[in-house]
Amino acid sequence: MALTGYSWLFLSAAFLSAGADISITPEPAQPAEGDNVTLTVHGLSGEVLAYNWYAGPTLSLTYLVASYIVSTGDETPGPAHTGREAVRPDGGLDIRGALPGHSGTYILQTLNRQLQTDVGYGHVQVYEILAQPVVTANNTALVERRDTLRLACSSPSPAEVRWFFNGEALPIAIRLGQSPDGRVLTRHGVRREEAGAYQCEVWNPVSVSRSEPVNLTVYYGPERVAILQDSTTRTGCTIKLDFNTSLTLWCVSQSCPEPEYVWAFNGRALKNGQDHLNITSMTAAQEGTYTCIAKNPKTLLSGSASVVVKLSAAAVAMTIVPVPTRPMEGQDVTLTVQGYPKDLLVYAWYRGPASEPGRLLSQLPSGNWIAGPAHTGREVGFANCSLLVQKLNLTDAGRYTLKTVTLQGKTETLEVELQVSPLE
């Protein structure tokens, strides 16, 4: 009985199946696009006259790939033939350069010499070579606890998606914000620990592709503002310095980005926008409260810390320092007093030892001063006990004595030797 074309298709329905156990397996089992795939047939029995291959769920002419006559080797393409399929003499089906569109159910229908038909089913999945996905973010610079992060993984493939954070698989706790398909990641009230590099990866059994990283910045702070002295936290404490020594205060905080700094002394703003403040040549005038204010321009938050800076006990002891130290003839000199009593009642300067006849001048509680016998008209006294001597001459050199009396009646006497260099 000769068979040609599709003629036997219409005969097959009239005969019972022989009941053979036909199975179909693809080789390779998980082909990638571009691979040559063979649908191998198992369980054929008896002498087969012809094969029909279908690429679809039913034995419909619409899904017919090809018919094959064994005796002649004639193959007739069907409506579902893509130009890549060829039937083998043993009943197998070759697909050259398979594409993802070749995925699906395949049915083999056979006709034997008794004009009985058998049917076998198989399935093939051709996996595509995945293109690189792209991660997009609603914003890459967010404010902690205020903004929402939304990351989307875009890929033309319906492949599985997984996320990576700083090169590591994203922890399950963070993945709680994923959409059902895994392609959108949402974090409400983003936290600082979630700043970093995000990537998504698409994968199937034969291909993996990971996106370029999207870097997320999370602004926060300032928090834990503190003032440091020599790497030691000094916030809220008192720093004591010796007279004429130096100090650098550092303002630190936890903040992103680095905050802007403002320093204040006793509540008055200083012209200093740096993260540190230098105090040089410590004197009584520099005693007080130093405050650092840190302001974050992104979060619009601020914080502050303060320290109290005082002269140490040793510095409180009264001293006299000529300024300049070695004045020349014709210059002015100030006998500068450091550590004078805060409860001062009166002081007196003497030319030489402390004695009434040699008194230069006295400072009274009213703030006025009274010239003494040794006053030349070139000496001026100040409220802090310092003495200015103007337009020096060589006879001004020698000993000067300061005598102070406190409100409690405590008397203290201090001497200084003034040297005057002649003009050359």
Image: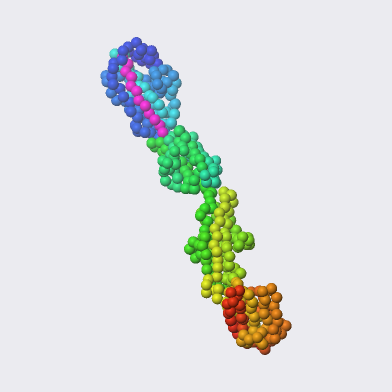
Q: What percent of the width, then of the height, locates residue 26?
A: 35, 29
Part of the protein shown in magenta: 116-127
Q: Is residue 289 above or below residue 47?
A: below
Q: Residue 155: image x %, image y %?
A: 48, 36
Residue occupying the point 48% across, 39% down: 185
* Residue located at (46% from left, 41% from top): 200
On whether residue 230 falls in the magenta region, the answer is: no
Residue at (45% x, 33% y) in the render: 180
Q: Residue at x 54, y 58 (%)?
A: 305
Rendered image coloring scheme: rainbow
On screen, residue 240 versus residue 205, left or right, reads right
Residue 290 seen in the figure: yes
Secondary structure mostly seen in magenta is: strand
Residue 46, located in which quarter of the rendered image? Answer: top left
Residue 333 lies, in percent from the top left, at 66, 80
Q: Is residue 394 above or below residue 249?
A: below
Q: Left of 151 or right of it: where is 374?
A: right
Q: Nearer the viewer, residue 88 or 55?
A: 55
Tell which of 68 and 326 is nearer to you: 326
Per the image, is 122 magenta?
A: yes
Residue 36 versus residue 165 in the image, above or below: above
Q: Residue furthest left?
A: 46
Examine the rendering and report whether any part of residue 338 can be seen.
no
Q: Quadrant of residue 94?
A: top left
Counting from the top left corner in percent of width and height, residue 201 is at: 44, 40
